[in-house]
Amino acid sequence: MAGGPLYHVVRDGEDLKSIAHLYGFFWQVLWDHDNNKDLRELRGSPNVLKTGDRVFVPALRQKKVTGSTGKTLKFKRKG
């Protein structure tokens, strides 16, 4: 899912890892984001989310890479 920043409302059975994956992030990026400070203080652990909690999800950033025509570029995916 692409788009701008938003708040995801936690549903039954969701955890931070599944929410992060849904939006194309590592769970640590969401957990450590300044806009999730209140959630971190309230729950204390990324493994403890309750139905109705709100998780801030920032907009994805596009990465641009330049390269020479006719050359092979190698990319390494994290995670």
Image: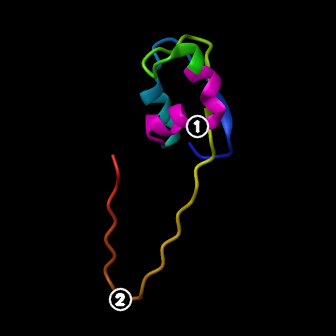
Q: Is residue 2 above or below residue 7?
A: below
- Front residue of 68/1: it is 68
Query: Magenta includes 7?
Result: no
- Front residue of 54/36: it is 36
Residue occupying image coordinates x 42% and y 29%: 17
Residue matched to label 1: 33
The residue stretch that appears in magenta: 25-40
Q: Main secondary structure of the magenta part?
A: helix
Q: Secondary structure at mark 2?
A: loop
Q: Are marks 2 and 1 in contact (CB under 8 Å)?
A: no
Q: Is residue 19 above or below residue 50?
A: below
Q: Nearer the viewer, mark 2 or mark 1?
A: 1
Q: How many neighbours does mark 2 have within 10 angstroms: few (below 14), some (14-19), or many (20 or more)? A: few
Task: Identify the amino acid type marked 1.
Answer: His
Residue occupying image coordinates x 63% and y 46%: 59
Residue matched to label 2: 70
Q: Secondary structure at mark 1?
A: loop
Residue occupying image coordinates x 52% and y 63%: 63
